[in-house]
Each structure stands twice: as C-alpha cells, then as structure tokens.
Image (spheres, helix red, strand yellow):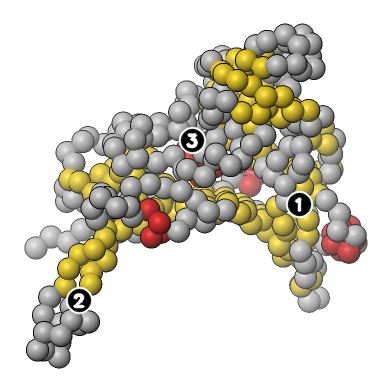
Amino acid sequence: MATKRGFLAWRAFSRSKEATFDTAATIDSTENHLGSDPIALSLDLVPDTDVDGGYEDATRQDEIAKRVEGEHSQRLTPNAAGLFLAYAMGNVSTVANEPAATFYTHTITPRPKTFASGVTALDISPITVDDTQGFPATGKLFFESDAVEVSYTSKTATTFVVGAHRATVDNEAISLKDVEVLHTLPSMTVLEEIGLSSKYQYTGVVVSRVEIEAARKQFARITATLMGSGTRTTQSTARPSILTAEPILKAGDATVLTGGTWDGRTYTGGANINTVIRSFRWAVINDIEEDDGYLFNGGFVRGRAERIRRSQEFSISLELHDNTYLNNLVNSDNVVLRVHFDATSSYALTLIFPRLRFRAVPMSGGVVVLVTDSDMSVLQHGNTGSVHVDVINLQDGYVY
C-alpha cells in the first residue's frame, strides 16, 4: 500500500468571504505552505458511562459536535499578508491604480477605514470617499487627523450621507467611530490536497490568530491559525494557480523606523533602526469562544463565528547602543514604529503602530554584543487606532 508524502500537499483559499457563513465561496489561488500539518477534522464524542446500563465499560458513544482546526505557515508575500490579515481583522479598503497602474493598495485595520476622495465643502452632503466597504448602513464617522465626529444616515459604494461637518481634506483618513458592530468575523473557504487524490473542502473557516515575524538573513514568515465550522466535503476541483509573480519578502527588504508622526494617512520623520534591529514578531489574536458557535437547530457544526475581544502582541530584538529603550521603559514613552517591506516593482507591505510601549527591556549578551529581547504593548491611539497595514499588489480585493 502506497503511503502519502507531505511535499505533495497544497492548500488554496477564497479571497472573497462567504456570502453566508459555512456556504462555500470561490477558491481563488494556491498558497505554498511550510510543511504545515493537514487541517484536522475531529469529533466530540460522548460515551454512555454516565448511564446505568448494567456494564462497567461504555457500550456506545455518540457524536455531539464536529471541529475543524489547522495552522498555515508560509514565507511572507504581499498576497498572504493581505489574505490572512484581512480575514483576521475583517476590515479592508481597496484603491485601484495605486501607487501605479494595474496595482491595488489594500488598507487593513481593526475598524473600518477609508480615505476622502477630493474635497467636500463645509456642510455639503454626501462626503465622497475611496470606498465604504465594511461600514454599516448607518453610524458615525471619525476624522482621524483631528478627532472630529459626524453621523451618517446612509451610504453608497463611495459616499456617506451626513449632516453638518467641517470641510474634508483630500486623502484624509476617515474611520468608523462605533466598534460594537464589529465582532462577527468573515469566513473563508479552504481547499486542501494531502496527496493520493485526498482532496477536501472546508467551509466556515475563520482566522483565529495571525502572526508575522522577520529576522536578519531570513525570509519573513506569516502563520495563520484556522478554525472551521466542522463542515468538510470531498472535492474534485482542480488546483488553482499560484501567484508566481509575487515576491517573497525578507528582512533585507525591510526598513524599520521609530518616532516620527502618523496622522492616519501619512507617516513623516522617524529614525532608522535597521542597523540595530535583529528581529520582530507581531500577532493578532481573535478571542473566539469555541463552544459559542454551536447553535440550536445547528446540527453538529458551528453556525456562526464571533470573537470576544481582539488583542495583539509585539516583540522586538534590538542591539543596545545607548539608553534609549531603557529610558522609554522607565518614562512609559509611547513609541511610533513603522516597518516597510519594499519588494520588486510596486509590491510592498507596510505595518504602522501608532502607540507601542515597552513592557520590559531585559539585557543579555555576556561579553559580546548586548541585546534586548523586549515585549511591547500594542495600545490604542485615540485618533489613529492600534495598527495600520497597507498591502500593495495586483489582487483586486480581499474579503469583500
């Protein structure tokens, strides 16, 4: 009997979310992974040992629920960053022909965000923006540069109908003020081949955790923890194409700046720390209560995907050259940090953290180079949120 080989495996994803949770979306492209184990289907089984039946051992066991879980780890590309971060945070705004013809810029944030398109004069309605994806039908807009708020009563694909407001500035950042409506996560469909014609499709899959890490002389890596509804079907779908034109991002492509200013749209200033940074790791964690997804009349599978409270982790390894980082810790300084991967052509990935704080600055190294492997808190900035991601590539959108 022939045995399976892991190197024959492949995995493909839907870039657009499922219109209804646990209903298959179109599979778009294959992503090569770094030896991740196959996605696992497991059953919650209950024996009858709590029943008086005349026997010491169980006489039967009954299925009560299905679970699907897995991890996907790969070398970081712009498409992988856009795909998994958009599903993890659920909010993405896409602009075509930016920064060059045929390219798209995808802005991914914890709360819906867009940018003013042109200037809308004082008290004139509607306000024109790049797009309104992810914004609810009604709500409150938040101008990030000066914390001005304005309510809107309806929207189109590129406008908000608003009341009295100040004049908008072209390209300024506008986000959703209210966050209470954003706890439902978008779901994707995943297709996996594990060799010897064993091909399965999983629906109702959400990203419960995503992590990006980079270190000197290494390719950057992205790892996504996946949680499915429990639905698995056998498929004969052909393998989708791989985005071979996408560059693999590495630490050698990245510029890291600290300090500077960020107004929600434009980063200026900052000090280059490329010569002292050794590595960094950033994670987004969606706190999902696994059992909450199983609903009345839902059979064996989850019927929804909601998170409790999202959190983030950030750690960084730095060579010590002065007391800057220790002083940042002692003074509880807010640190702005920007990581920009500038690959070939117009492909790029940018991570901006408006407010980080050191939690500890432990020093090590003995008689050689002194370093600090520090954990930092990712904090909410009152105006510009906790993190801003820009992905630039040739894909026309994610989630929506």
Using a 10 Å C-alpha cutoff, classify the residue at mark 3 as few (fewer than 14 neighbours), some (14 to 19) or many (20 or more).
many
Q: Amino acid at mark 3?
A: Asn
- The residue labelled by disc 1 is 356
Tell me which numbered mark, 2 or 3, is placed earlier along the sequence. Answer: 2
Residues 95 and 143: in front is: 143
Query: Where residue 115 appears, x then y in whole percent?
Result: 67, 22
Say which of 169 and 201 sits in front.
169
- Residue drawn at x 59%, y 45% is 250
Disc 1 versus disc 2: nearer the observer:
2
For mark 1, does the 10 Å Cα neighbourhood hold few (<14), some (14 to 19), or many (20 or more) residues?
A: many
Asked if residue 341 is positioned above or below residue 53 in the image, the reply reads: above
Across and down, in percent, residue 23 comes to 29, 37
Identity of the residue drawn at 79% across and 71% down = 363
Tell me what residue is drawn at x 65 percent, y 44 percent: 252
In percent of width and height, residue 350 lies at: 65, 37
Q: Which mark is residue 79?
A: 3
Q: CA distance from mark 1 to mark 2?
A: 49 Å
Instruction: Say which of marks 2 and 3 sits in front.
Output: 2
Looking at the rendered image, the disc whose residue lies closer to the viewer, 1 or 3, is 1
Task: State left or right for residue 306 relative to residue 115.
Answer: left
Numbered badge on residue 1? none
Q: Amino acid at mark 2?
A: Pro
Circle 1 sits in a helix, a strand or a loop, which is it?
Answer: strand
Q: Distance from label 1 to label 3 (Cα)?
A: 26 Å
Tell me the quarter of the image containing the C terminus.
top left
- The dot on residue 47 is 2
72 sits left or right of 86 in the view: left
Q: Amino acid at mark 1?
A: Leu
The residue at 79%/32% (across/down) is: 147
SS of the residue under disc 2: strand
Q: Is residue 254 left or right of residue 144?
A: left
Secondary element at tag 3: helix
